[in-house]
Image (cartoon, rainbow, N blue to C red):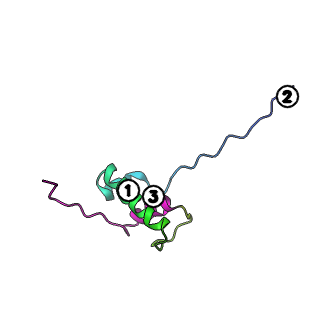
Amino acid sequence: MRVSESKPEKIAIMMEPPIGVLLIIAGSQYALAMIVAKRARELASGDGVLCDCDTDKPVSVAAFEVGEKMIMHIPVKSGIK
């Protein structure tokens, strides 16, 4: 009996834009997650793409837009009281 050799599955890894650059732009991991998630929801609901990228996945497009500084986060200095 011969065991068939299976090819390893390809794992999609986000290479561009680098996560370090995105963290510098966003300021924190939480802010980055919120910015990308909100923009991805907007893209999924039909908003236009602001950058020229090779993918059509909303989260990847949103990350590219943040990396190109087309989507910015303006932090609020006053908190909830």
**Image location of residue 49, percent across then percent down:** 48, 72
Q: Nearer the viewer, residue 52 or 39?
A: 39
The residue carrying mark 3 is 17
Q: Nearer the viewer, residue 18 or 74?
A: 74
- Seen at 30% across and 51% down, the residue is 28
Q: Earlier in the sequence, mark 2 or mark 1?
A: 2
Q: Is 55 placed left or right of 30 in the picture?
A: right
The residue carrying mark 2 is 2
Task: Identify the amino acid type marked 3.
Answer: Pro
Q: Regarding mark 3 in the picture, which secondary structure is present there?
A: loop
The residue carrying mark 1 is 22
Judge the density around disc 1: few (<14), some (14-19), many (≥20) Cα neighbours within 10 Å: many
Q: Is residue 3 above or below residue 63?
A: above
Measured in 3D between alpha carbons, the distance from the residue under mark 1 to the one under mark 3, in whole angstroms, is 7 Å
- Seen at 47% across and 71% down, the residue is 51
**Image quarter hosting the N terminus:** top right
Q: Regarding mark 2 in the picture, which secondary structure is present there?
A: loop
- Is residue 77 part of the magenta span, yes or no? yes
Task: Identify the amino acid type marked 1.
Answer: Leu
Judge the density around disc 3: few (<14), some (14-19), many (≥20) Cα neighbours within 10 Å: some
Tell me whether the residue at label 1 lies in contact with that at label 3, contact meaning CB atoms closer than 8 angstroms: yes
